[in-house]
Image: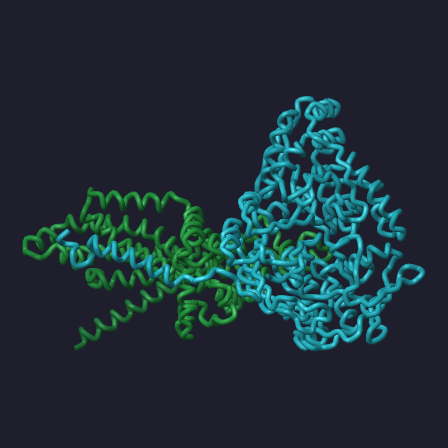
Chain colours: A green, B cyan
Amino acid sequence: MPAAAGQTKARRLRALRNAGRFLVIIVLTYLGLLAVTFFIGRVMPIDPVLVVLGDHASGDAVARVREEMGLNKPLWQQFYIYLGKVLQGDFGTSVLSSNPVMQDIRRAFPATLELATLGIIIGVGLGVPLGVWAAVRQGRWVDQIVRVMGLVGYSVPIFWLGLMGLVLFYAKLGWVGGPGRVDVTYEYTLANVSGLLLLDAAMANQWDAFANVLSHLILPASLLGYFSLAYISRMTRSFMLHELSQEYVVAARAKGLSEARIIWRHALRNAMVPLVTVITLSYAGLLEGSVLTETVFAWPGLGLYITNSLQNADMNAVLGGTIVVGSVFIGLNLLSDVLYKALDPRTRIR
Amino acid sequence: MRYLKPVLNRRVLVAAVASTFAWAAGVTSAVAATPKDTLVLAFAFDDIITMDPAEVFEISGSEVVNNTYDRLVRLDLSDTSRLVNDIAKSWTISADGKTFSFEIKPGLKFASGNPLTAEDVAFSFQRAVILDKGPAFILGQFGFTKDNVKDKIKATGPLTLTLDVDKAYAPSFVLNCLSADVASVVDKKLLLSNEVAGDLGYAWLKTHYAGSGPLKLREWRANEVVALERNDNYYGTKAPLARVLYRHVKESSTQRLLLEKGDVDIARNLSPQDLAALAGNKDIISSSAPKGTVYYISLNQKNPNLAKPEVREALKWLLDYSAIGDTLIKNIGIIDQNFLPKGLLGASTAMPYKLDVDKAKALLVKAGLPNGFKVTIDMRTIQPVQGITESFQQTAKRAGIDVEIIPGDGKQVLTKYRARTHDMYIGQWGADYWDPHSNATFVQNSDNSDEAKAKPLAWRNAWVVPELDKMADAAVLERDTARRKKMYEDMQAEFRKTSPFIMLFQQVEVADARSNVVGFKLGPTFGSNYMFTVSKK
């Protein structure tokens, strides 16, 4: 059947072209990300040699290290050299820790990953039902409460809320563990294999360590969860209101379907389509690492790492962190595209 | 509530919230206390960049090196004008003052088990000079270079070693420099076995340990933890506690909460507000020590207004020293109007200046600026620097001087200062080694050109003062201690009158500890905070 064969070939060509286009976009995104960060870093009024040698070193040492770090070469040449190394997998060494940058990030990122994941679970787990409830009871007290919670979430500084949380739940009530990922006693007994301490403790069957890690995790995760909850519940409410005003809802009611089924099975299912994008972007935002939360809770995550590196003009570390954050965004954007297609059959039809 | 019944109704919500709290209460640690054999400190150490004594220059790194490495001589903490022998058994100086001979204590071992010989000491010094990192100038200033150091510093026997310096320096000066971090003794055999491409073990030692001190470095995780352990091969009194753990905690309020709950034994970076709040707590003891760091405001002589001598003096009369001393730097600083901090040879306690707006105005008239002038000041956005700058802005306004504050981040402001593009600058200088010559940078400026390689503080403010410069050079060669002391006192008298530096205060380091911590004492330098003498009741 020549027509069908021709159709398959055309579809395959289209798929290849799409994949090719996608790849080009990814490469250009990374290139742009690196170029902008690199040049901002070099243009920043901080002397990187100052960080390496300190303020008191001799003039000869300073000149020598400047040369060693390649800082006397023209900017575009420095960038070219850096790109060349990156393509070989060498992201450079951090000035501050003397380790390869990716080794440092491999240690810092899981801390942020654990925190962000638990945070988004709390944010979605509470935010979506709250948003639905607010939409269904639009104008009633539930709606007002959700509105106020959202407002507080936008306006109250996370730094202050975090400290207040520590004062209340840790210092006064003793319900949660303190700042830091785990108690000092587990420093020598809990092996850090993956960096995700909950996973490591579970795999090693150290359930007391697991409980301890959870007690340290719950407060900062709730904080981040609260802030994403504020946004997610507002968006859920908004999407749900849109869905509940559609004609198919009236038709479903007329057909005699129960309200619960209409809300959860149909309206929410349709609202999920744009909501998935909101949730994945919120998750990506949390994965960047909230430096304020990490400072208050002494959490050695990506936010603290990148900020500290930036303040010390440790550009290899900042660029490495930028690549990781950029990859996270690109990956999650892809995921939301895939989920979008999965949830909305209309997008699959050409 | 019909449609929400199966999934989410009021009862379910309440039950969920209640059970969450119950569970949370269950999973928390029953006792929030530190292990008995471990000293836990909350300390902000994001400034550490290396564990190699030949490279360490920042505050936190210096403390770790002081606790984990030995050197020939150390500061006597009970009397900081004296040195005590560390691994040196005795030493002599030749008649011409240029050769120092040391005898090392016998039978010493590194933590690795390797014996500690004179060859290790010579290697340590040679290595520091050859690698030529940040603190190398401390040894380099005695005429040691990459090419001659192996001849000038050498082991003459298994336990004897000589140093040939290029001039007849004051003996106290040389020995003070040998008590600095850069003169720490490293394990030659261990380093060479971890050498890569002839780097003398540099890449390895950045994150590892090759010492012989009372504590040894177990692990350094940047921004997270520094873990030290008792070294059982140490020649002196063994550390009472098995482990010392530094936890990186940047925020003062967080450190305070941890200390109050007993999750740390000592908190090192408490703000004045948190210190005041903890003052009434009977479970917490506060200790403090003045440090070799002085804060100052400097006037760039490239600015024509600031170059006028009357203006320089007028500005010194425009600071409310007593108010600053009583409020902004209470407990964390002592007003000091000289460039040598208390404790260093030749330090002066003379304080001629106080707030006197009328005197300042009269001086401005003499300078031909009766209506004042406009000027900027570069400042780091941290306390107490920010508070002092704002206070200075207010008092200067009363004499008609309009000060504009340019805030910035630490390294950013320092970069601008080193490029001499500032008007006024407020900052600090910490002594690199416990000798007055370390602060001679305030008056030394042999090459005032923009391309000059060296950037002493006088250069950074384009201040050329050949008389004081020569006096500083001569003071370092004065072998009579009493005469040397007088020279620094004379220098400071002249400095107080004419320099473009408004000296502000000497820093005091404060730390709070739980009441069961015994033997914790802060030293005069940032490194000399010894944790190996601390125990817990």
Q: Nearer the viewer, residue A159 or B402?
A: A159
Task: Name the image quarter holding the C terminus of chain B.
Answer: bottom right
Q: Is residue A300 visible?
A: yes
Tell me the residue at 82%/73% (across/down).
Answer: B159
Q: How many marks?
A: 0
Task: Spot the residue most to the right.
Answer: B95
In the image, residue A317 above or below residue A168: below
> What percent of the width, then of the height, locates residue B375?
64, 32
In the image, residue A295 above or below residue A191: above
Q: Relative to residue B153, is residue B229 drawn left or right?
A: left
Tell me the residue at 63%/60% (across/down).
Answer: A69
Q: Is residue A39 visible?
A: no
In the image, residue B53 above or below residue B254: below
Tell me the residue at 75%/68% (across/down).
Answer: B124
> What percent of the width, then of the height, locates residue B199?
69, 71
Q: Relative to residue B442, is residue B50 drawn left or right?
A: left
> What percent of the width, then of the height, locates residue A239?
23, 50
> What percent of the width, then of the height, locates residue A260?
14, 56
